[in-house]
Image (cartoon, rainbow, N blue to C red):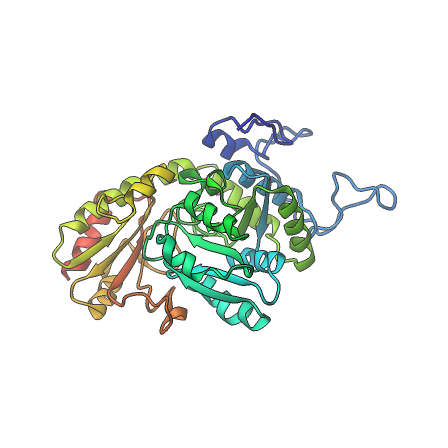
Amino acid sequence: MTASTHDHGHSDEHGFSTRAIHAGQEPDPQTGAVVPAIHPSSTFKQDGVGGLRGGYEYSRSGNPTRDALQECLASLERGTRAFAFASGLAAEDALIRTVLKPGDHVVLPDDAYGGTYRLFAKVAAPWGIDFDTAHMPDAASIAAAIKPGRTKLLWVETPSNPLLGISDIAQLAKIAHEAGALLVVDNTFASPYLQQPLTLGADVVVHSMTKYLGGHSDVVGGALVVADDALGEQLAYHQNAMGAVCGPFDAWLVLRGIKTLSVRMDRHCANAAAVVEMLLDHPAVSEVLWPGLPTHPNYDIAAKQMSGFGGMVSFRVTAGEDAAVRVCGATQIFTLAESLGGVESLIEHPARMTHASVAGSALEVPGDLVRISVGIEDAADLIADLLQALEG
């Protein structure tokens, strides 16, 4: 990539942590404040009719705090434009309504996040959007699901939620583009620190900023990042026209979280590796799902396209669903809660919690599955907590 410079003077050739702290976040020229301001104003004074200061007129259309976040996200994902929304699903909805029309077809992963599946099945489908599911690591499965001339989006999560499947982004981009479709990659589990799908050929990156980007379980938000300027212009229009924007306080919280993303992800990855090592040897666990295991069916792809294997781990409990539910309720440091990616460790039962909306569908997850978001506490304490829960 040739060196380019963002509006606030930080080269794209700077390292990840430098860009996370500085992209879009230059000290205030008037006061020297090193932290971006929160601009809660809903409207902006005009110097004469149409005389906008910095292009700002109304905060749905543009807000300085949200713009700082969007500039930072674009830099981290190596994109040209980024757009921040009120939630991850709001971002997905804006994308769907920007690039699809009734009669179009989408290929979804067969282990998609339940909320994404619900959005397509219950909201987009009645509007006329058709979709099929495919096993994304399998090119033949994808090819069978594509409808020539109608398929406009190929949607993938890698790693996927909650089965931690890994798909080859570069291969999927080739398949999508040959079919005349766009490749959308949900990069929430990896975060831009571990993986940048746009550099591998993806067209759109989706994030739930609620998770690793925010990182502290105190904000809900979503984002889209694109490489193509024309698609960026379309999304900018729809972001304003539809209005599900990220508010300035939320944008500021995500920016604050992003500053420590790299150091947090390093600890998440290290703690996950330690927890996985314990789970592999435990008789109450029948299977461990984590991309960093050499036994993972797509370990080689994960090692190629990711710089680390993440803090998300799923495992299956030998004694079945009731035992899995008991484990989820028996931990003391791991908090029983939905969501993921915060500094604190969380545990949940996907079949009854995050993925209850796909029960009875092709995306139904095993009842004996437990998903953990490994936080940044002391690894020894996390291991001891899981041990007592498994043996209780």
Residue 168 x/y as whole percent:
38, 46
Q: Nearer the viewer, residue 250 or 159?
A: 159
Residue 125 x/y as whole percent:
53, 70
Q: Quadrant of the C terminus?
A: bottom left
Q: Is residue 132 shown above or below 228? A: below
Where residue 5 sits, quadrant-wise, is top right
Which residue lies most toward the left here?
A: 283
Residue 116 makes an appearance in the image: yes
Residue 58 x/y as whole percent:
73, 51
Residue 278 x/y as whole percent:
17, 48
Q: Is residue 9 shown above or below 201? A: above
Q: Nearer the viewer, residue 135 or 315?
A: 135
Q: Nearer the viewer, residue 301 or 344?
A: 301
Where residue 108 sits, quadrant-wise, is bottom left
Describe residue 18's horizontal placement relative to residue 296 as left or right: right
Q: Nearer the viewer, residue 289 or 294?
A: 294
Q: Residue at x 41, y 61 (%)?
A: 144
Q: Residue at x 60, y 56 (%)?
A: 99
Where residue 377 sits, quadrant-wise, is top left
Tally of numbered discs: 0
Q: Residue at x 70, y 50 (%)?
A: 61
Q: Is residue 99 shown above or below 227? A: below
Residue 206 makes an appearance in the image: no
